[in-house]
Structures are given as structure tokens and as C-alpha cells.
Image (cartoon, rainbow, N blue to C red):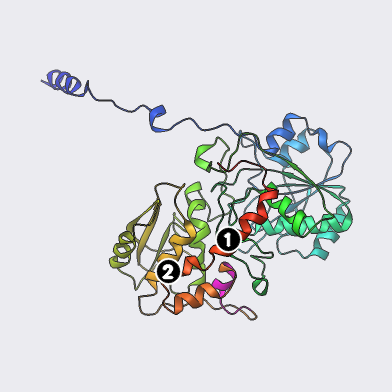
Amino acid sequence: MRRNLLTATGGALAGLAIPTRADAAPARKRVRTGMDRLAAAKWAALDGEKVGVVANLTAVDREYRHLVDRMHADGVRIAAIFGPEHGFRGSAPVGGDEGIATDPRTGLRVYDGYLATLDGWTKMFTEAGVTTVVFDIQDVGARFYTYIWTLFDSMAAAAALNLRYVVLDRPNPIGGRARGPMLKPAFVSAIGKKEIVQQHGMTIGELARLYRGEWLPKVRLEVIECEGWRGDLFAADTDVPWVMPSPNMPTPDTALVYAGTCLFEGVASLSEGRGTTRPFELAGAPNLDFHWRDRLAGLDLPGVEFREAYFEPRVGKFVDRLCVGVEVRVGDPRVFDPVGTATAMLIEAKRYPGFTWRTDPWPIPHFVDKLAGSDRFRTMIDAGAPLAEVTGAWADELAAFDRKRKPYLIYPRP
């Protein structure tokens, strides 16, 4: 009887096209990072130099071997290592660092570069005897992700000391398109130091070229470029290994939404999903209900769907309290706008009683203003402006940034 059933089932399925693994997952495009290319050249560009390495856990090859470990094993003369937020090996939480220490694997001195001033960086480079700085950290494409300001500050120190500065480039995991509002000079902070837009759409090497061209003309910059990357490629399209660049950036899916949903950190009454397995993809609060999801779904925003979600954060806001909200599901990253989507979510969340912006120390009393780059975003939402009006307010400055960045781009934007 069982044999007959299997035979009959097999016959019924014979005419169906069952997708194979290859059908379900198209081949990823091979991309060689700057690290890959420097290693293939046997580190020749660093011969005779005392190298200061600014890096974290993301500086790996496709076998997950770390840049520092490989350089050290191959005899490159490393003067010291300099770690960003979360530390060199990535063990520290948000807003934290690993301090000054000795790396147990290599025995090399590790300095704390997080929140270091220009004077701090120059002192560290001088003390270590650095002649060439090498930077290799995976960025995620958002202005408020602190690694790009570690890049800026260490470049400024290298310029002051006339050091050579080498960036090992990596793809931008959320593509090459710029979106969102511009940072205004009055709102400069540790999470935004120069006038760039919220989703800058540049690789770390392209940003370094922008920094030199606009603000750091004396830096002796060299960018070892990627091979095979284009601005229409996302992390899921390439074979570059993903290493979570910070504790709340576990997957490329997180990076896709982060440039927008990080704005929820500026709202005291709304969880951005920290303390869950889907930070920045989950959002909600104890006083929300399923109508939030229904209203968002009704907006028919491009490239995204919203799943009704219930979660209890283990750290951060609303610890161990049931939150009602949504999971942000990106269907098509090529049309998805993380900044516009997050703006719509905040406008709809503002309908609920108790919506409260997170306060912050003077001189910028609202944390969301640091994230958005000015107080315009917050004041327009408070005034009840519709989505099109809020997002339209930054159209001209976004277009101006696109023009400004164009001479510094390395890779094509189809």
C-alpha cells in the first residue's frame, strides 16, 4: 500500500518543476576586497613600514582569517592595533570599547580609538611609532554608524603627522544609493561630524576620498579598491563573508533597515528591537496594537512588508515587557527606502498616546536630532506633517550631496 502511494505521488509530482538549491539561490558575484588584493600581492605595499592597523572583527578574508593575524604571520611589521567602538575583537557593547590591552593571539599592543580626539589619535600614533596607517572595517552605510568617524578622526591625525594612510576597501552592504536628510553643522556630534546624508551610499574607500577632497586635503591617502563590486549590489549579491560588525548588526538584513530604523533610538516610547534576535527589524511598544501594522501595510511603501509582531526585549527599552509592533521585511532592496519607511513608521506611531522623544544632554537636547542631522525632522512630525512633506524636505540637499560625492566615487552606479 505504501509503495503504491509513493508511486502515485511520484507520478503526480513528475510534471512539477521543483526548484533546486541553485535555482533558489542564484550564484553570488565574486568580489575581491582591498584586503584580498593586498594579501595576494604579499603585502608589498607595506614593505619597510611600521604599520598601525585600525580594524575590528570584520577585517577578514573569505576563509575568515583576520587581517592582523595574517599580516603578523607573514612578517609585516605591525607597530600597534587601534580598535573602534565595540573594540578590536568586537567584545564590547554599544557605546563601549575594550580599552588598552595586549592582543592575546599576536601579543600586539591594542589602543582604544573609540571617541579619541585628534590629539588622542596623534598621541597614540606617535607613541606607537607608526609610519603607515591601514584601515579595514566593514561599514553599513549609515551616517550615525561610528566607524566612519573613526576613519575621519584617524585620517585627520595621519594628516597632522604626515603619515601615509591606506584604506582596504569593502563593499557597502546596502548598495550605492544615497538617501535621507543632510547633517547640519549645528548638530555635529560623535555620531555625525561632517555634512553627509543619512544613508551615504558610499564604500569606506569612497568616503575616505570624500573626506580628503572636502576636509582633509593634506592626508596622504591610498585606497586599495575592491574588484567586481557595483553600486547596485547588496551584501546578499556578493561572496564577501558577512561578519556582524557590531553586537546588534547580526545579519545583512539588519543592515538593510538600520539606516532608517535606527531613528527609533531617538524615541523613548518605542523599542528598536534591541534585546531581541532581530534588532532594528522589530519595533514596537507596550501601548501599541495591531492597527499600527495595518496602517503601515495600507501605505503600500515600496519594497517592504510589515508583519504583526509581539516580543519581549531582554535589554534596552521595555525589558521583559510584552511589546506589540511590527517586523520590517524587505522584499526588494533595490526600491526599498529605509529612511522613508522609518519616517512613515514614526508618523503612524505618533498617533498613540504617550509618544515621547528621547532627551539628551545639552546642547542638542533630543537624541533624534543627532540621528536625523537637525531638528527639522522631529518638529515636522510633531506638527503633523504628512509623509510626502517630511521626506520632500530633504530632496534638494540630497540632490546636492549626490553631486558633491560624484567626483569621489570609485565604482559604477548602474
Which residue is at the front of the view, 184 or 269? 184
In the picture, the quarter occupied by the N terminus is: top left
Of mark 2 and mark 1, the one earlier in the sequence is: 2
Q: Which of marks 2 and 1 is in front?
A: 1
Magenta segment includes 172: no
Q: Is the magenta stretch mostly helix, strand or loop?
A: helix
| Location of mark 2 (residue) | 346
Disc 1 designates what residue? 398
The residue shown at (70%, 49%) is 408
**210 to 94, vertically: above or below:** above
Distance, label 2 to label 1, CA atoms, is 21 Å
Q: Which amino acid does label 1 sit on?
A: Leu
Q: Is residue 402 left or right of residue 219?
A: left
Is mark 2 in CB contact (under 8 Å) with mark 1? no
Residue beneath the point at 42% across and 69% down: 346
Q: What element carries label 2?
A: helix
Indicate the position of residue 164 as horizontal and vertical percent values. 84, 47
Q: Give the range drawn in magenta.
A: 364-371
Element type at marker 1? helix
Q: Does residue 194 show up?
A: yes
Q: Where is residue 103 in the image (x, y as percent from the top left)?
A: 73, 48
Instruction: Give the residue displayed 32% in from the left and 62% down from the top.
Output: 293
Crowding at label 1, few (<14), some or many (≥20) Cα neighbours within 10 Å?
many
Q: Residue at x 82, y 58 (%)?
A: 157
Quadrant in the picture for residue 117 = bottom right
Q: Position of residue 284 (x, y in %)?
A: 39, 66
| Res 316 seen here | no
Single out the residue that lies furthest toward the left: 1
- The answer to whether 145 is drawn above or below residue 233 in the figure is below
In the rendered structure, the answer to whether residue 305 lies left or right of residue 357 reads left
Q: Where is residue 314 in the image (x, y as percent from the top left)?
A: 45, 63
Q: What residue type is labelled 2?
A: Leu
